[in-house]
Amino acid sequence: MKSTWDIFCTVVDNYGDIGVTWRLARQLVAEQGLAVRLWVDDLEAFVRLCPAADAGAAQQWRAGVDVRHWPGQWQPVAPGDVVIGAFGCRLPADYIEALRLRARPALWLNLEYLSAEDWVEGCHGLASPQANGLRTLFFFPGFTYKTGGLLREGTLLARREAFEADPAARTAFLGSLGVQVEEGARLLSLFAYENAQLSNWLDALAEDGQPSHLLVPEGRILADVRQWLCEPGLGVGDVRRKGALTVQILPFVSQDDYDRLLWACDFNAVRGEDSFVRAQWAGKPLLWHIYVQDENAHWEKLEAFLKLYRQGLSEKAGDALVELWRAWNMDRDMGAAWRGVLRHWPQLQAHARQWSAAQAARPDLATTLVQFYRNWL
């Protein structure tokens, strides 16, 4: 008999939380053969990632996942064998009480945010006793064998390699988005939060000796792009040229198409958690816009990843990479940092590929979750 899994997601920061939980739910169904209910409080956000979905449906089946609207007024349901509260979301009180009364105990996991910080390994799998007698266990995604790993479908890298080996597929995909790339141009994608340093970076791209084509899926950074171009009405489908830089605004695309977009580009600027991980699987040089936390706690998280990611790079290439990421996240001069990175471009390209392969050699998050449950039984 299939084990049943409940995943709860509160949409807090646009699409990051639902992006991770939707990928996880699909993979648990497709590759592990599990019965998964995904509880989402904001179905409008879900529809952006799964355009076929119905934002008004209390229940719907998508890719084999039982997608449920998480209502403000909770209706009783039998809890699953495994319960995952994603990213600190609070489960409904009545659901928790049903968990307590369950004849056979369920495994209750808190799926935490991704981090490379040293303390994560020591906290992964730790229990947190609750006042009602239940206990939750902390489950941390991560980059080492002592963590839960990263979300990665079993066929992901093979699909990426097939895409890269087929220039016609790349051309057709870009063409479906209305993108025609000038020969010899560097293709970049930009998905980020608002950033005061964007203008410095775009100035550097516009003044570069090599042409660049920047693809910007609609999102929060679009206001800064409009400001740089002095075009407040700039929107989806618009293409503008300034110096050596072509800027093109794309529609928000599905998760599968976003993967292909990352594969098609030479460099990817990403944000949050979901696109950050997918950019790593793309095996291309990347730039991460980390989510800002109180008291600049996110800087420690950023530095922890950079310390890990730069391993294997020469000292100069590593320093250039670190300076670019710090400039983007700490309001420093992006123009100078970008020019520094370009001096080490071939090495950074090779390193991105090697990093992707090294992470793919470790168990993925969905597999690790299932094994954790089996060991718990």
Image (tube, rainbow, N blue to C red):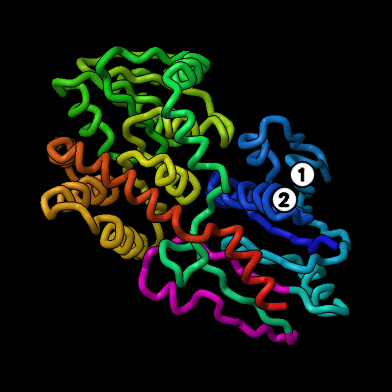
Q: Is residue 314 above or below residue 132?
A: above
Q: Is residue 280 above or below residue 166?
A: below
Q: Nearer the viewer, residue 99 or 147?
A: 147
Q: Are marks 2 and 1 in contact (CB under 8 Å)?
A: yes
Q: Nearer the viewer, residue 372 or 261?
A: 372
Q: Is residue 219 left or right of residue 300?
A: right
Q: Nearer the viewer, residue 281 or 113?
A: 281
Q: Earlier in the sequence, mark 2 or mark 1?
A: 2
The answer to which image quadrant residue 257 occupies is top right
**Residue plotted at (12% across, 37% down):** 343
Considering the image in quadrants, where does the N terminus appear? bottom right
Judge the density around disc 1: few (<14), some (14-19), many (≥20) Cα neighbours within 10 Å: some
Judge the density around disc 2: few (<14), some (14-19), many (≥20) Cα neighbours within 10 Å: some
Q: Nearer the viewer, residue 232 or 149?
A: 149
Q: Is residue 155 left or right of residue 374?
A: left
Q: Amino acid at mark 1?
A: Gly
Q: Is residue 121 above or below residue 215?
A: below
- Span colored in magenta: 107-133
Q: Position of residue 240 (x, y in %)?
A: 34, 14
Q: CA distance from mark 2 to mark 1?
A: 6 Å
Evaluate whether residue 340 shows in this view: yes
Residue linked to disc 2: 29
Q: Is residue 238 above or below residue 275?
A: above
**Residue plotted at (41% across, 66% down):** 144
- SS of the residue under disc 1: loop
**Residue plotted at (48% across, 42% down):** 157
Residue linked to disc 1: 64
Q: Amino acid at mark 2?
A: Val
Q: Position of residue 83 (x, y in %)?
A: 72, 66
The stretch drawn in magenta includes residue 111: yes
